[in-house]
Structures are given as C-alpha cells and as structure tokens.
Image (cartoon, grey):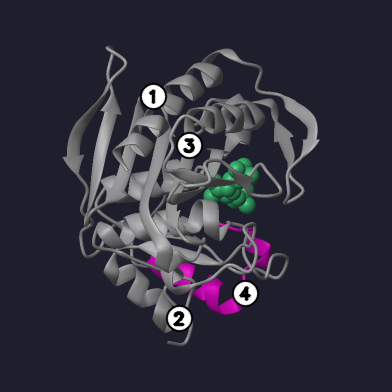
Amino acid sequence: MTEIFNAIKASAIRIRYAIENDDTGYSHNQNATGDVQLKLDIKSDFIIEEEFSKISTVKELASEEKEHVKPMHKNGKYLIGYDPLDGSSLADVNLSVGSIFGIYEDDYRGCNLKASVYVVYGPRVEIVIGYDGRVELHRLDADHEFHFIQLINLDNKGKLNSPGGTQKNWLPHHKEMIESIFADGYRLRYSGGMVPDLHQILLKGGGLFSYPATSDVPKGKLRMTFEVFPFAQIYELAGGQAIDGKQRLLDMTPEHIHDTTPCFFGSNEEIERVKLAYGN
Ligand code: AHG
C-alpha cells in the first residue's frame, strides 16, 4: 500500500504543476458520463496512469475519465477507482480542485475498499489518507516532500452545511431538512468542488455535505466508485457517517463503474437528522 500512496504523491506533484502552468480550457472529447473533458482532466488521468503503471501491485484502473477499466499488472492485488481532477471546471476561476482515489480488492463494491486517498490542490497541496483505522493529513512542503501534519477526527456535531444539487429540483423533504439545518444556525459552505467542501468540514470538526436525489437527477450526480466510496470511508474512519439517505454508502454495490448515488457525509448529529428527514 505504501507504494500506491507514494505513486499518488508523485502524481499530485505533477498535477499541481499542470494546474499552475497548463491551459484550463476544454478539449473536444466527452467522458463516459457525457461531460466534456477539460485538457487538465485528460492530462491528470495520463499522469496518474503513468505513475500507477510502475507499481506491480496495481491490477487494474477505473477512471472517471475512461469509459472502461484499464488492465495494469496481471498478478497485481489492487483495483484503483479514481477521479483524476474532480471539480476541474473550477480551475479556470482559481478555486481549489482535487484528485480522489479508492483502493479496492476483488471488485469495486464499497465493502471491498481497503484504503482511500484524496489530494486538495488549494493554496497548499494536502493529501488525506484513510487507512488502517485512521485518517492522516499530510502537506507538501517547499522541499517537494509530503510531511505528516495531524490525524483527522470529526466532532459529534459541526457548524457547516454544504448542500449540493440544483435547489429548484430538490424534493420537498430534502428542502425542509436543509432549511431546518440553516434555521438552527449552520453556515453555508459550498464551493462546487466536493474535495475542498468535504475537506473543510473534516478539518473544521463537522457539519453536513449533501448531494441528494433531485427531480432532474434521481440517482444524484456523484459517482460511487471514484468519488462517493472513498469519501464515505474517510468520513467513517474520522468518526462520522456516510449514507445515501437511508443506507450506509459502503454497503452499496455499483452495477457499473460509472454509477452515481445520492450521498450525505457528515458528523453523527447531522447524519441522524438526515435519517429522520428521509424516513428512517
Ligand atoms: P466535475 O468533476 O464533473 O466538475 O464535478 C464536480 C462534482 C463535485 O466536486 C461537486 O460537489 C459537484 O460536482 C458540484 O455539482 P453542482 O455543480 O451540481 O453543484
């Protein structure tokens, strides 16, 4: 696993350089979900594939930017589901973006996730690793090395609310729940990038991030394999919870690697509120 974490760190340094120096415009290609790919999406995917190709324990890659899985090393043990540059459309307005990785064994079910990692490219580059019962924060220093900073643990209740999805398409029970959370004094924090939004909640002690089912996207927007399961594991390891409204996200099985799901990540009190609002 250390080799895999090191490959992620090496790709993060290269992707950071691309974000700072490359064209942030669109390419002429679409990914499997029909999103037009940015040149930075394609470049980040290429960098990650190149770094993982050097690691013999990596059996297969599933990227948000590739329609099909990509075989790597036949005798490898791990399957890696990743979003090379999440929130990439925020790069041209200079907001934070991220890379997300789930390291699986056997298949891409939530229960087979062995470790999760994300990288935040913000004013500083940080990497968060959920593995072996804990969540660690590391930061890139001027010497181009990542250094351990601290363990991350959520409080039982937070103060931040990050409500995703198009508001006019929220379902009535969801709208009511979000309004009642704000009525209780929670503050809005939503950049439109799940990596910095979820990172903020983790580091400020707690709160709620939601990307619900809406009338236009009944299965939500965020993808299980590349985005949702890795953050679900990190939130659980940090002492919080991650559900789809009713069930635990890590108990879910995607039928296809690009499947999406409604999702709620948060500290315990906020997730208990979601369960009540969603009829549990
Ligand atoms: P993408 O990588 O395709 O830009 O998607 C980003 C994701 C996620 O990071 C964020 O939480 C969500 O899309 C934002 O979606 P909305 O624009 O619908 O709020």
The answer to whether residue 182 of the structure is visible from this angle is: no
Of residue 227 and residue 55, the one placed in the foreground of this image is 55
- The residue tagged 4 is 171
Q: Distance between the residues labelled 3 and 1?
A: 12 Å
**x and y, in percent, of residue 177 in the image:** 47, 73
Residue plotted at (51% across, 62% down): 107
Q: Using residue 154 as the reference point, say whether residue 209 is left or right of it.
A: right
Q: Residues within 10 Å of mark 3 (few under 14, many from 20)?
A: many
- The residue tagged 1 is 123
The answer to whether residue 270 of the structure is visible from this angle is: yes
- The residue tagged 3 is 98
Lower position in the chain sequence, tag 4 or tag 1: 1
Magenta residue span: 164-183
Q: Say if disc 3 is inside 8 Å of ligand 1.
A: yes
Q: Which is the main secondary structure of the residues drawn in magenta?
A: helix
**Tag 3 and tag 1, C-beta contact below 8 Å:** no
**x and y, in percent, of residue 234 in the image:** 33, 54
Of residue 43 and residue 85, the one placed in the foreground of this image is 43
**x and y, in percent, of residue 190 in the image:** 48, 47
Q: What element carries label 4?
A: loop
Residue 260 higher or lower than 45, as above or below: below
